[in-house]
Amino acid sequence: MIKNDLSDQLTDAGFCVVPDVLNAQQVSSVRQKLLAAAHNFKKSGASTFMPELDPNARNVRVFNLITLDAVFRQLILHPGAIEYVKVLLGEHYMISNFTANIALPGSGSMPIHSDLGFVSPPPWLAPHSMNIIWCLDDIYESNGATRYIPGSHLFQSLDDLPVEPMQQTVAFEASAGSVIAMDGRMWHTSGANVTENSERAMLFGYYSADFLRPQVNWNALLPAELQSSLDPELFRRLGLMAEGNARHAGELLQLKLHERRIS
Ligand SMILES: O=C(O)CCC(=O)C(=O)O
């Protein structure tokens, strides 16, 4: 059941932390599956180090989680997360991406950014995208918790960014099993993991309004046999149906017919 105070916080402050969406046993199972997925991802020839994103290879990036294990196909539509997606995006949300970032001790911050800025040019006037961030470890400042600029979900263009944006960031704090729901306009980055031996594994489910092109092309990315075996709801939310961006045309047509009737 969605908590009203969290829903209000998400709308007003641009984020909320929802505790205990997964229990300890589920966290441990998902974490193990993530490590196996990272291993298989590497074995397939892909790199988990993205020099354009991270300063060194202590950030382990795992892309395209949807193909890597059934548990990720369940998490991306987990009801305890989707109810928060609907707070910002309404009923017509789509899945834009699903990735992981394991920050090992010694990892550093990536460039600060807003995720809406990756899929839509400014002005950024409304929450047309959002993240559901799954915490598979307790996350806190010293183990590289995601950092954000409070209030930055209201920045409308690059002109609103402070001169030294990193200095304005604060770290999220959340226990393993929580999700952080975050407005896609929020400026954020990964923190540096300065601990001796505390890993920080997080999954980033990214969702957007259905009129925005997803960050990845699921049609090209997902093998045909996986596509044909997907649950119909997941198939639809990944935008794999033949119908593309037709909802708004349909609504406009309705409006025209309505106007005709009243004129
Ligand atoms: O790992 C993090 O804390 C942030 C990751 C992120 O923002 C991204 O990959 O775009």
Image: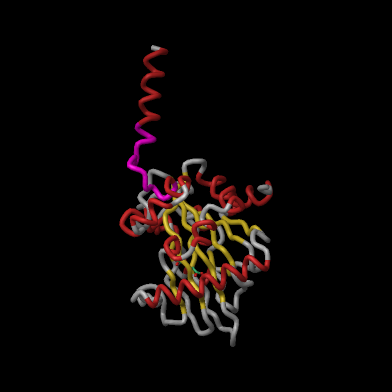
What colour scheme was applied to this rendering of the protein?
Answer: secondary structure
Q: Position of residue 244 (x, y in %)?
A: 34, 42
User: Looking at the image, which residue is at 64% across and 68% down?
Assistant: 176
Q: Is residue 59 left or right of residue 170?
A: left
Is 8 inside the magenta-drawn segment?
no
Query: In the rendering, at what x and y percent does residue 213 appear?
Result: 35, 50
- Residue 157 horizontal/vertical position (percent): 40, 55
Residue that extends furthest to the left in the rendered view of this protein: 220
Q: Nearer the viewer, residue 37 or 215?
A: 37
Image height of 114 relative to 235, above or below:
below
Magenta segment range?
A: 237-249
* Residue 166 in sight: no
Residue in front for this viewpoint, 85 or 189: 85
- The residue most toward the bottom is 196
- State whether residue 9 is above or below residue 148: above
- Please report the residue visible at 43 percent of the width from the left and 45 percent of the height from the top: 236
Instruction: Judge left or right: residue 114 versus residue 7.
Output: left
Q: Residue at x 63, y 59 (%)?
A: 17
Q: Is residue 245 magenta?
A: yes
Report the residue at 56% width, 73% height from top. Answer: 32
Nearest the eye: 189 or 227: 227
Residue 239: % across, % down: 38, 47
Number of numbered labels in the structure image: 0
Q: Quadrant of the C terminus?
A: top left
Q: Secondary structure of the magenta portion, mostly?
A: loop
Question: With 173 as the anchor, is 217 left or right in this view?
Answer: left
Q: Is residue 72 visible?
A: yes
Q: Is residue 30 left or right of residue 233?
A: right
Above or below — where is 197 with respect to 91?
Answer: below
